[in-house]
Image: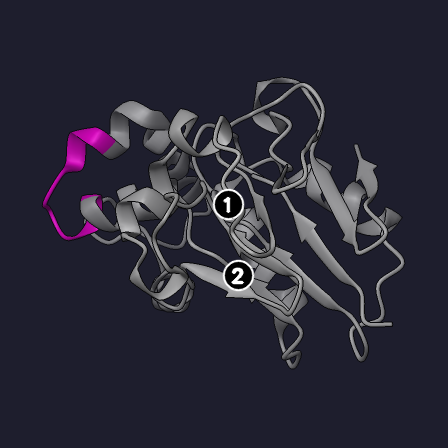
């Protein structure tokens, strides 16, 4: 049986990411690994996290990267549409991480391969049994008609909804002390950057790994 592993919001917590990956018995030739978004901001090692993820995925079609609201804010910062929104939400830590690498300057802090990584992120990933998305989905709206803003930012309206999306929705964005498991959704952001754990769920077994 094909397994899918999904990893919650990393937010620059490289050490936890490395330890978590060491716990997962994934076979990249048979299984799929989905990262749910928010790789950057707030934590100290955003650049290093992206380096690690890019290296992990190199040569593999089974690693999927979703877009989080923090990658959305980074793009707004880079294109000049909303610089303060990014900086006020942990973006300073990301810029500092890139500048401390000694490879870039304040005018162009992020290397081109990282920019390509951010531009390549998906809004969602689906299998026969699950929908993976960063923040959640709006009830009564078909998947292909979901709004990007909702998929990256929605919280209570989705979390407290008992709407049946036809498949379980696996999401991050909203931090819980432990994974949220309901009939219609599984929340796997367990607040790694706030001193709590980084979590991965293995599906369909609903087996959880945390560090």
Residue at the outermost left position: 81
Badge 2 element: strand
Locate residue 68, reporting x and y percent.
42, 46
Does the magenta run of residues contain 27? no
Q: Which residue is mark 2?
A: 65
Query: Could you tell me how many numbered marks the image carries?
Result: 2
Q: Residue at x 69, y 62 (%)?
A: 33
Q: Is residue 89 above or below residue 76?
A: above
Badge 1 element: loop
Query: Which residue range is magenta in the image?
Result: 77-85
Q: Residue at x 20, y 50 (%)?
A: 78
Closer to viewer: mark 2 or mark 1: 2
Q: Which residue is mark 1?
A: 39
Q: Nearer the viewer, residue 123 or 169?
A: 169
Locate residue 180, reporting x and y percent.
67, 30
Q: Nearer the viewer, residue 101 or 210?
A: 210
Locate residue 162, reporting x and y percent.
53, 34
Q: Nearer the viewer, residue 71 or 33?
A: 33
Q: Residue at x 75, y 46 (%)?
A: 201
């Amino acid at each position: 049986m094909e397994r899918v592993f999904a990893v919650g919001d990393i937010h620059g917590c490289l050490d936890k990411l490395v330890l978590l990956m060491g716990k997962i018995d994934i076979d990249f030739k048979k299984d799929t690994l989905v990262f749910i978004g928010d790789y950057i901001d707030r934590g100290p090692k955003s650049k290093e996290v992206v380096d690690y993820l890019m290296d992990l995925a190199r040569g593999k079609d089974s690693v999927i990267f979703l877009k989080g609201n923090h990658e959305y804010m980074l793009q707004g910062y880079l294109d000049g549409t909303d610089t303060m929104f990014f900086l006020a939400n942990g973006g300073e830590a990301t810029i500092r991480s890139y500048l401390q690498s000694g490879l870039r300057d304040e005018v162009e802090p992020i290397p081109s391969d990282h920019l390509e990584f951010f531009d390549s992120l998906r809004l969602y990933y689906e299998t026969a049994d699950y929908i993976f998305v960063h923040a959640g989905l709006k009830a009564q709206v078909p998947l292909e008609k979901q709004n990007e803003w909702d998929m990256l930012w929605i919280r209570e309206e989705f979390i407290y909804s008992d709407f049946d999306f036809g498949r379980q929705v696996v999401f991050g964005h909203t931090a819980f002390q432990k994974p949220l498991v309901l009939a219609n959704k599984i929340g796997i952001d367990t607040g790694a950057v706030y001193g709590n754990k980084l979590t991965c769920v293995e599906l369909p077994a609903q087996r959880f790994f945390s560090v």
